[in-house]
Image (spheres, rainbow, N blue to C red):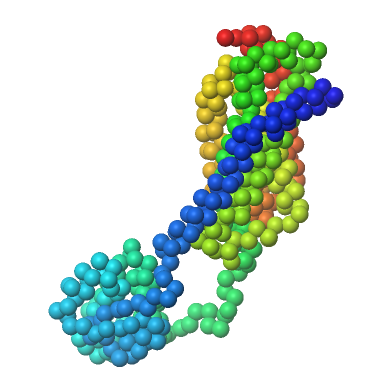
């Protein structure tokens, strides 16, 4: 154990004394928060109407009743003749006008005469023109459409739906937050964890192999299994810290990415047990990833070759991460939690959706630890192989 701790201290010193490496480890978390925040602000400004903007709508043959309802919601309504429709539509295309409505000349009379059961012709039709690339125009269209739809329902109101029912939606605010976070975070977490591991492991093994320092370690009394354990544990610890920082930055930036929907996304819905399980899942997943990347790095002759060789593994990790977005939640069958990496995705999905089995989480953690130990034995065998360690 003393030798393992010595190797770990060496790796920690190499990492923390290299300011560039520390910065590159923290940089993804900073960039994620800044970029997601910027994207959310940009999307909000792109699709949200101006707060103090007063929409303007032009109407042909608008009945007094509908005109008053439209003006009551703050939309300026201007009557025009049919000959002006083409010009107004051009102005809508140019984003100078928000909305144009064309009513039949005898709209009220047609509505009064129309009977759903006996009339053979089409119902009276209202034409509306707007510009979907203009948030103000889109907002005006949605508002007027809702007014007309409610007005139409009031003319032939044969039954009501959810009258006086204020809580028809049974999903709580916590359910909504959990649903949004669980659909995004497993994939993002797997990508972030892999990126953190691949930023450290190749330099630690292939880098030392390339510089010749690994050969020096191999001729010391240090056991090969101790060297493998020290490498994996130290790299896993550093990657774990990187993963936690990145995960925190991502969760904090999600409301901004969703256009400032702080009322929809609330990370405070998770308790201490949820975060504890998540931390253990992250740590066990990192152990597996570090073991896999270390094996690939040990086979490589240079850091560049090692980084290139782990790209197929990155594709596999991304494909496994995508599975968390399908299936309607985490798997309930414990057998799925024996599959490396996939079990981690399912565990994260269950934790973030607040619908998981503690037994399955424990199975996932233990199985990942077993796979990490197997990877450690494989790395030890590679350290014992002169063909692998001293190949040029």
Taking the spot 74% from the left edge, 57% from the top edge, the residue there is 271
Image check: 152 left or right of 91?
right
The N terminus lies in which quarter of the figure? Answer: top right
Q: Is residue 329 above or below residue 4?
A: below
Left or right, 334 with respect to 61, comes to right
Residue drawn at the location 65% of the way across and 22% of the way down: 205
Q: Position of residue 253 (x, y in %)?
A: 57, 54
Please, which residue is most extreme toward the right here? 2
Q: Please say if 282 is above or below 13.
A: below
Q: Residue at x 73, y 15 (%)?
A: 217
Picture coordinates of residue 153 (x, y %)? 39, 82
Does residue 153 appear in this view?
Answer: no
Quadrant housing residue 92: bottom left
Q: Nearer the viewer, residue 285 or 262?
A: 262
Q: Residue at x 73, y 42 (%)?
A: 280
Q: Is residue 28 visible?
A: yes
Q: How many marks?
A: 0
Q: Position of residue 392 (x, y in %)?
A: 57, 9
Picture quadrant where residue 264 is located: bottom right
151 vs 387, left or right, is left
Q: Position of residue 332 (x, y in %)?
A: 66, 47
Quadrant in the picture for residue 235: top right
In the rendered image, the vertical position of residue 313 relative to residue 172, given as above or below: above
Q: What is the residue that sits farthest to the left in this orientation?
A: 83
Along the line of sight, the residue nearer the viewer: 321 or 265 = 265
């Amino acid at each position: 154990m003393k030798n393992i701790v010595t190797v770990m201290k060496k790796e920690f010193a190499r990492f923390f004394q290299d300011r560039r490496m520390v910065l590159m480890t923290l940089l993804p978390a900073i960039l994620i928060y800044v970029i997601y925040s910027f994207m959310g602000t940009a999307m909000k400004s792109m699709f949200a109407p101006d707060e103090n903007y007063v929409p303007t709508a032009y109407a042909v043959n608008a009945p007094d009743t509908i005109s008053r309802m439209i003006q009551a919601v703050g939309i300026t309504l201007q009557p025009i003749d049919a000959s002006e429709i083409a010009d107004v539509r051009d102005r809508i295309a140019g984003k100078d006008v928000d909305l144009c409505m064309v009513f039949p000349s005898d709209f009220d009379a047609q509505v009064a005469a129309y009977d759903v059961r006996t009339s053979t012709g089409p119902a009276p039709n209202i034409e509306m023109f707007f510009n979907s690339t203009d948030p103000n125009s889109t907002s005006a269209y949605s508002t007027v459409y809702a007014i007309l739809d409610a007005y139409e329902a009031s003319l032939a109101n044969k039954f009501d739906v959810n009258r006086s029912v204020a809580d028809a939606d049974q999903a709580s605010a916590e359910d909504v937050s959990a649903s949004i976070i669980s659909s995004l975070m497993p994939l993002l977490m797997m990508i972030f964890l892999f990126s953190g591991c691949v930023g450290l492991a190749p330099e630690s093994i292939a880098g030392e192999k390339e510089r010749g320092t690994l050969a020096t370690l191999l001729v010391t009394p240090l056991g090969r299994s101790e060297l493998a354990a020290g490498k994996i544990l130290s790299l896993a610890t550093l990657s774990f810290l990187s993963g936690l920082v990145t995960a925190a930055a991502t969760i904090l930036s999600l409301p901004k990415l969703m256009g400032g929907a702080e009322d929809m996304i609330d990370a405070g819905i998770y308790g201490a047990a949820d975060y504890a399980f998540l931390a253990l899942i992250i740590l066990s997943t990192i152990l597996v990833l570090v073991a896999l990347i270390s094996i690939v790095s040990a086979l490589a002759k240079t850091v560049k070759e090692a980084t290139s060789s782990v790209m197929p593994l990155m594709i596999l990790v991304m494909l496994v991460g995508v599975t968390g977005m399908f299936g309607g939640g985490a798997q309930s069958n414990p057998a799925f939690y024996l599959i490396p990496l996939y079990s981690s995705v399912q565990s994260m999905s269950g934790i973030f959706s607040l619908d998981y089995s503690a037994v399955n989480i424990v199975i996932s953690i233990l199985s990942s630890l077993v796979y990490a130990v197997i990877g450690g034995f494989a790395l030890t065998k590679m350290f014992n192989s002169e063909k692998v360690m001293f190949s040029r």
